[in-house]
Image (cartoon, rainbow, N blue to C red):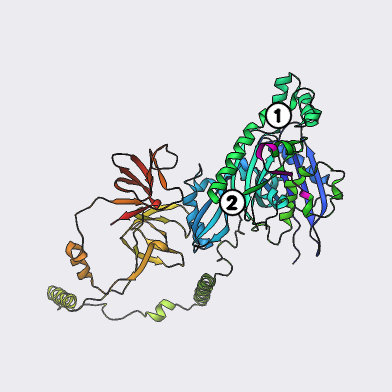
Amino acid sequence: MVKKEIFGLDISDYSIEALQLTKPLFGKPKITAYARSVFKTSLVKDGIIKDKKKLQDSLVKLLDSAKPQKIRTPFCVLSLPDSQVFTTVFKLPAGLKHKEIKNTIPFKAEEVIPFKSSEVYYDFKTITVEGASQEIFYAAVPVKVVDAYVEVLEAIGLKPIAFDLESLSLARILIDVNNKKSAKLLMDIGSRTTNLTIFDRQGIRASGVVKVAGGRFTKAIMAAKKITEKSANELKIKTGFDSKKDTGKVVAILQNESKKVVGEAKQLIEFYQAEAQRHVDEIILAGGSALLPSIDQHFANSFGLVVNLGKPFAKIKDPGALGNVKGKEIIFSNVLGLALRGIEKKPETSDINLLPLRKNPLLKFLPEKGDRKHWQRFFTRLAILILMLAGLLAVITTKQQGVDFYNYFSPASDTGKFVPADINLDVLDQLRDQAIQRELASTTEALAPKTMVRILPTSAGYANVRDGAGAEFSKVGEAKSGSEYELLERGEEWHKIKLDDKISGWVFSTFTELFETSTTTPAAESSAENNPEVLGVSNETKPIKIRVKENAVGYLNVREGAATSFKKVGSVPVGGVYEVVEESDGWYKIKDASVEGWVYGIYFDIVE
């Protein structure tokens, strides 16, 4: 099977770049096509598309202008700016499998991102496993951001296969991911923002965005020198942080503007070194503003660390296709990182992908590859369906030939059509009633055992019921802990239950146990229903008490209302026990002398 060609596409505020690589059998990848366009006014601002039509036209021209040959393949890998992406690292038990993490992580993410899980596209990957825990890198982006790019690309015939993070793309081309000795700070200085990313042990560990970059430098020079934006930009590019070239205190202006970047970066480094007990030993510069003269020396003096300009060509063959780029290599970093992903064996899944992988509509009902149990069930049902269709076709065919199956198997009876005149109908009715009473008194048909589902105790006091077998499906109800429900369909990770006469849905199997009802009779059921002692029913209710579970930060937020969108009003320590005064949609309201508010139920244990 021929591998499809994929190019990297970097869309930034004032420029777009496309680059395609080929991977030889031996040696480094080679550039086969490249194009770049620069704009006076931005078509995209901080990752948000401002003019879709102009961006479409610009992309078509860009691909046609590629050298030494046009880019013809429709498949591409894009990056999203870090300012639009929410990232964090979760610590979870090492024994959790990918599917279990996928079911758990949306709920944990809602505690730290300002969106519901239904409002974002997200992805995650395990970056380390140590002892009893594993570190999971999580990234999410608002749905509308990705959908806008997909709409633009598909309108001109392009097919995105992955949406990457800009910081991951830069790390792929600028950092040795196999280096496990120390951490690196990647400082991407663009036009609007400076993105700070600590990369360590094959993953992003901490990140931040500072709204100070090249554009801010230019405006500061404009204001101080009272000159035009064009003149200020030229002066910035010529002088930079080089005091030998300074003729009008430009260096002092830039040093003052860069103080916020230095301060934020120092805080990020100190936080990570204290939290992870790992040393950050180098700062790697990227982005167009990293080309300012002597900026590396300025940061080296400010941080007391080794500061180097990134070297994007170290991982590829002779970049002659780019022309004379000496001194400007760094501007190709992101698009090279994207193109490098494009030549990987499985670019869709080789790293974080914020483009939801879409299944062929004709294949969406098929089980996942390798899921033997569900494939067996699928083929069994398919065989039954084929037999039913064959039987129905046979009935229709024979019916058309004049054969009446109903009369064949149930011939009409000639008896009972006439009642003799001398029969006493009242006596006949009495005899019939007596026979029915004897039948009811002497025989009671036993009910066949049924498989039931019992909901196990949960911190929320219930398990969510969804309209499909997965956490991504909508919630249709709640099954209370300790309650029992009829099992409608048994799955490996999700079970379908009958919640009530009108609602059925799926519950996560971890929160359930299956059992079979003992053989009983309708009369016995009626007796049990009317006798609470038989069922062990008690009318006495006790107040619920909950205890804060162990977590990484040692406390849990208390909010004004039952959602993460409400304001924080306090916190409760790990191990604290509180009485529940109200419950709503998985949240508990607690109250004591020190605090009153709502807490999320999954972070508590119910105290017996």
- Closest to the observer, 19 or 569: 569
Q: Quadrant of the N terminus?
A: bottom right
Residue, x 51% and y 58% (percent of image)?
101
Q: Earlier in the sequence, mark 2 or mark 1?
A: 1
Q: Quadrant of the C terminus?
A: bottom left
* Amino acid identity at mark 1: Leu
Q: Position of residue 27 (x, y in %)?
A: 81, 61
Residue 247 colored in magenta in the image: no
* Amino acid identity at mark 2: Arg
Quarter of image, res 38 = top right
In the rendered view, tell whether residue 472 sits above or below residue 526: above
User: Magenta residues?
Assistant: 301-312
Label number found at residue 254: 1
Q: Position of residue 492 (x, y in %)?
A: 46, 67
Q: Position of residue 209 (x, y in %)?
A: 61, 39
In the rendered view, tell whether residue 40 sits above or below residue 348: above
Residue behind mark 2: 278
Residue, x 81% and y 45% (percent of image)?
35
- Closest to the observer, 386 or 479: 479
Residue 585 visible, this angle: yes
In the rendered view, tell whether residue 412 sits above or below residue 495: below
